[in-house]
Amino acid sequence: MASYRGPKGGSLKYCHIFKMAASITGLLKPWTPRVILVRWSRYNPYYLEPEIQREAYSVPDTELTTEEKQQRELKELRPIKAATSGITSSVFSDPVLSKFINMIMKGGDKVLAKNIMTDTLEHVKRKQVEKYHKAPQGKGEDIECNPYTIFHQALDNCKPVIGLASIQKGGKFYQVPIPLTDNRRRFLAMKWIITECRENRHRRTHLYEKLSQELLAAFVKEGNVIKKKHELHKMAESNRAYAHYRWW
Amino acid sequence: MALQRVSFRLRQTVACARSIHTSGCRHLQEALAVEPERNPEPFSIFRTQESDPACQLENHVGQYYTLPPAHIQTVFPHGLPARFQLQMKTFNEGCVMVRPPALEVISYLKRADYSKPALRFLFYGVKGSGKTMSLCHTVHYCSTQGWLVVHIPDAHLWVKNCKELLPSSYNGSRFDQPLQATNWLRNFRVTNEQFLSKIQTRHRYVWTKREFTEEGRPLGELVDQGITRVKSSSDVVGAVIKELRLQSGQPEGCFRMAVAVDGLNALWGRSTIKKEDKSPVSIEELTLMHNLRKLVKNDWCGGAIITALSQTGSLYTPKTAYLPHVLLGEEGFDRMDPFVPVTVSNYSEKEFESCYLYYQDRQWLQHPQSRTEEGKKELVFMSNRNPSALERLCAFL
């Protein structure tokens, strides 16, 4: 039996199992799918996702269910994908925030995007904490100082409930109201916030100042992004008649 | 019934002694009905009520003391680091941690013999370890003891980014920096108001054909001359330094001088200022730096020279350099010798705890995970207990 070397050149421990599944071994060669995936993962589907959370490793064997035990044994045999540089096992990591940082990023400069985001959070927190300390005794409790809750709440306030799609019927294009998936709603909210900040401010202000102003406004349901969301809702409401053009 | 009340009070006292959060202490206050002048946080581990640096001892190490707002405006118009000023604005108070390097220098200043030449102290340490804050703490001590404080907040600012460079009228080969000099004179006036009328000039100074300052005029007039006539401000700085050096040791002068220079390595480094023909200006050719070198020399008595190194603003030095020999260079080290070197290191465990509790108290650590043990361990690891790294980490958490 020739010992099979995986695609990266590392030898696999239990190669005698692969001898049986010759077709699967064939799949581990550099895999090119029939439809070329340009932006998606180029990994062979045989590879498993890495486990990032630290807590998953501290669970002792006795507390696992049979499925989890099988999953662990499988992970000992199968190759694992490399973790991307954007994810951390830090207790402070937030997937929504990481997505937002990726959307701010230009030209692959993650360092700059992350710095902009941290400056934004610091700026928001400074404004709120200053208000808290200057407020008289009783009013301090109402002021929200946590920049993360402000960010998440502002994002939630900016998410549209319903979207529009351009559907062709009888030679004309109609704006038809359609339901949006959660991912699409989150994407639209983030995109609107970033484009609004980049375009509608004085060019000499820093992006973190613009973002912090917009996030604080969206937190209290004011600002241009909330206005844009409301306009989209109004358009969808006015085009209710075309809703039956949607076939999915 | 009385026993119940007493046990209720004792339970509250114990609860408050355990909890550091101020709200618990305020409930205790209401329960015990203490008089309103008493400080609102009697059981804080990280704060001390001793706001006079002269009375601070080793048992106060790691605790924060509050700078009185009046002192901040007079003593520190330009001395505090930018991030600390931002923190003061946010928290609505200025709190400085009592740390061993500053206490050491203050104890030396208490016991020094001021009839001998001025002692020189140098704070050095890795980037962000708290050298400038220790310097400011010592300057606060000197100010509360009634000394005259000559505080140069950052010597690096005088050797780079100079918008206006005039040839000096006093010495043709030197260059003046009117803007920096005027700015410094203004801040000097704010810090030392009470001395400006008491000290008299000993020499006659001629500024232009028609402007001169006679002997025996108060120092305030000299300083005003420099602020109003911007062109001669660098020479005024030189004159002020000369007067103060001559008079500080005198028994009838009755004032002690504290010279505080931050970024001392700028005096013996290089500058990025260029002359009109694009050739670089050496430090010797700048009037302000020339006079500053004379000030830092210990040929006068009746005071102390407290300095701090700084790699952050320095020019043409590697990022990892922090030792005096490396940053000052051969010439600088020889000129500064003999001096008392004082190491400023990262936070100890106790100081870190204190800083963590202070940030929690001021509502600065907002992330829910930052209040857990895991989050705290992560903060320790990521900042390596370096004060400025911790401050920057906690800023966005």
Image (cartoon, helix red, strand yellow):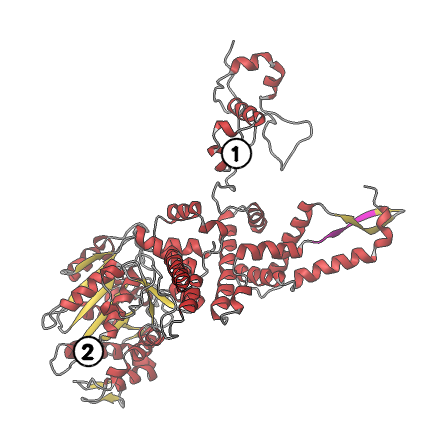
Task: From this view, report whether residue B120 is shown above or below residue A118.
Answer: below
Marker disc for residue B244: 2
**Label 1 environment density (alpha carbons within 10 Å; few <14, some 14–19, many ≥20):** some
The question of residue A163 being in magenta is answered with: yes
On the image, which quarter does residue A33 sit in?
Answer: top right
Say which residue appears at 51% left-offset and 30% top-offset: A63
The residue closer to the viewer here, A199 or B391, is B391
Q: Position of residue B257 (x, y in %)?
A: 20, 74
Task: From this view, report whether residue A90 is shown above or below residue B239.
Answer: above
| Residue B286 seen in this snapshot | no
Marker disc for residue A51: 1
Q: Mark 1 — on which chain does it sit?
A: A
Q: Position of residue B57 (x, y in %)?
A: 22, 63
Amino acid type shown at disc 2: Leu
On the image, which quarter does residue B281 sit in?
Answer: bottom left
Is A57 situated left or right of B388 in this image?
Answer: right
* Total number of numbered discs in the rendering: 2
The label nearer to you, 1 versus 2, is 1
Q: Position of residue A199 (x, y in %)?
A: 62, 61
Give the farthest residue toward the left.
B116
| Residue B284 seen in this snapshot | yes
The residue closer to the viewer here, B258 or B111, is B111
Q: Secondary structure at mark 2?
A: helix
Give the farthest residue toward the top.
A1
Q: Secondary structure at mark 1?
A: loop
Q: Position of residue A90 (x, y in %)?
A: 47, 43
> Where the N terminus of chain B falls, by quadrant?
bottom left
Say which residue appears at 13% left-offset and 67% top-offset: B111
**Residue stretch rendered in magenta on the structure:** A160-167
**Residues under labels 1 and 2: Cα distance?**
68 Å
Amino acid type shown at disc 1: Glu
